[in-house]
Amino acid sequence: MGPGPANAHPRVLRAMAADLLGQFDPEFTAYMEEVMALYRPIFGTTNRWTFLIDGTARAAIEASLVSLTRPGDRVLVINFGRFGLLLEEILTRIGAKISRLDIPWGEVAAHDQIAAAIDEAAPQVVATVHGDTSTTTAQPLAGLGALCRAAGAYSYVDATATLGGMPFYTDEWELDVVTCGLQKCLGGPAGSAPITISDRAAEAIFARRHIEKGLSQGEAGGPAPRIQSNYFDLAMIMDYWSEKRLNHHTEATSMLYAARECARLALEEGLEARWARHHRAGKAMVAGLRAMGLTVYGQDAYRMANVTGVFIPEHVDGEAVRRRMRTEFEIEIGGAFGPLTGKIWRIGAMGVNARTHKVLITLGALEAVLRAEGLAVPAGAAVDAARSTF
Amino acid sequence: MGPGPANAHPRVLRAMAADLLGQFDPEFTAYMEEVMALYRPIFGTTNRWTFLIDGTARAAIEASLVSLTRPGDRVLVINFGRFGLLLEEILTRIGAKISRLDIPWGEVAAHDQIAAAIDEAAPQVVATVHGDTSTTTAQPLAGLGALCRAAGAYSYVDATATLGGMPFYTDEWELDVVTCGLQKCLGGPAGSAPITISDRAAEAIFARRHIEKGLSQGEAGGPAPRIQSNYFDLAMIMDYWSEKRLNHHTEATSMLYAARECARLALEEGLEARWARHHRAGKAMVAGLRAMGLTVYGQDAYRMANVTGVFIPEHVDGEAVRRRMRTEFEIEIGGAFGPLTGKIWRIGAMGVNARTHKVLITLGALEAVLRAEGLAVPAGAAVDAARSTF
């Protein structure tokens, strides 16, 4: 019940125990095609280029930025937490010229602020995060893509923390590249990172296409400079996921099975139902924490459904509480990063954990632990308040 | 029975179905420590820095090269196949100044050739491959590290295709960075890539250390230029795998379970016994293929134990044979890359497949398929010849 990774669905765990297949076996390439089809609705897109990066969520972030951005390109980062800073950090290494729209932690950027920042920076790429777990805040994204396209920029959004748990509409929001991971609302393990790419972004990336010497039969590369990474060269990875099946890495078979099962579960449940389940769990968590007399961090209007920040009460040792939660109740809750270190806990309810009993048990446990740590907490109030929201 | 990925051991598959743990849970960090300890003997090293990269084997290659090499550094690539070309390809993107010692496919570099190439290139890094599956050839590595160290260079070796299947001695050979994957002789799925790093290489990498802004409490970075990738920044990944546990990516939990089980299986069997098992399987495969009247590719003295190249006989459609093997016998054998495309098949026997019955069944199937494709093959000769070698 931390900010993720969370528990995986038992069906996802079992899917990984399936026998391996050769990476060019027709049965396996059919699974690859199926995965592409399964993730399109999850991303809210009809993008042909919807597939997996073999690595954790961070791998897909880097693959997107290194493939979209050329050294010297102007990039605007809309930064409202640790993962905004991570985007900047990755872009610095790529050699981008970075402008930052800095939003105080716990707040979000207004449409007008973004428009003004784009006007000023004239970026080739705009990069941001949907839900930044470091601040438990979700940035509204409607209109972002249109602003970017009007300015001739590509947009990139890291949706790792929210996809499958909060409404997300890649096409409606006109976003160009969106990535995520399995270990949050999708209820799988870290290690495979779904990505979707608009046709216009794919065209720009293919302009940098290059075929490995050991595979090439003398084809010419694209006109634009080569992407600075081989492993993260999206043009090569798309060639691998296309009917060309040009060998790149060896697809992580078991993680593909996991990604496939995560998507099947999400679509079987229905995305609207899944978002509503996460919303209910988050609302109950907030109500329970407030009924205990704790102060919830951030603004209700922009709160992520799946992770709740709550201030550590004065005179309470936050780490002692986390240890007791883990040792006495086998429940993990999260600490925080950067300016929030030692100030808030982050309590998640996502994927298979975004369920009534998990929220109630966590609140009951936290109440007992806070009392054990010397805080006067109204007995039973948190669980009752949470129950009443369901 | 292709050149890999191969089938995984059932225990490895089952290990991945285990419940997830939080990445900083003491139970999980204890597994991380255990994985470090398990891979040291497998690499033949006492290197402290022995851990996993979250990606396929290629991810660990890129992490090594981008962390060891600064733009403009002189790098010598000892190239005898597709994966030598891959090293060059990755290094080009990093901005290294590359010299290549080119060895014809199917042959290996002699110690004197390497010494002369190092003298001429005065490299800061020497990079090569142990077994290059594209040519089924293994480069002898004894003495390589000493040559590099005498010349003030770091050595990098990609041992993806051989580790766990052929003798490998990182420390005795004085190698600095060695990487592999799970999907060949270690009998696991692609998606996690073990790496080992000598203290001297770790020191050079830590000189480029840099702490992410979102995590930093104001610490200074190392004196040397920042590594060009965040995901592949070995200094940050080592900080994550150290007692500091500085957050980087979210460790791919299920793949770590798989990597752990692969190593436990290898050490339970005993490395010498495992190498001998692969050697026996390879020898039987070669004998069987020859008894069928086929010509085995490459030189016996430098043949990889776990994959055998064999010329496609004249007037035989190599792809039709591979299709029949798969559809009629559910056995995959490999085609080839680059100059060997359409000329040889590559038949593997590695990990859980390096066993008597797998070799015999494959040879029997191939005999039947070749006959079905119109080639006169002596009935029963291949299996008998292979049996007699066991």
Image (tube, coloured by chain):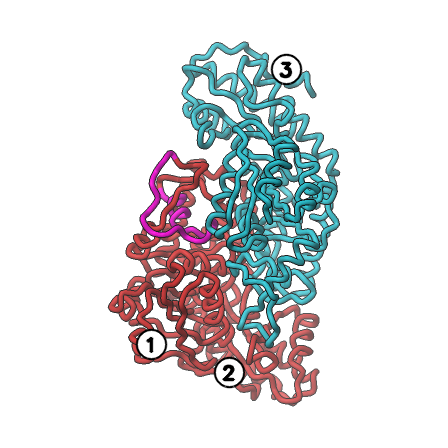
Chain colours: A cyan, B red
Q: Is residue B218 magenta?
A: yes
- Residue B327 at x, y = what percent? 70, 70
- Residue B244 at x, y = what percent? 36, 39
Residue drawn 43% across the image and 74% down it: B79
Which residue in the protein does label 3 denote? A385
From the image, state whether disc 3 or disc 1 is nearer to you: 1
Q: Specify the amino acid type for callout 2.
A: Tyr
Dot 2 falls on which chain?
Answer: B
Which residue in the protein does label 1 denote? B117
Camera-side residue of B144 and B323: B144
- Residue A206 at x, y = what percent? 63, 61
Dot 1 falls on which chain?
Answer: B
- Residue B144 at x, y = what percent? 31, 71
Q: Which residues are magenta?
A: B217-242
Q: Earlier in the sequence, mark 1 or mark 2?
A: 1
Q: Say few, some or many: other residues with alpha carbon within 10 Å of mark 2 (under 14 / 14 to 19 / 20 or more).
A: many
Dot 3 falls on which chain?
Answer: A
| Quadrant (top left/top right/bottom left/bottom right) for the N terminus of chain B | bottom right
Q: Secondary structure at mark 3?
A: helix
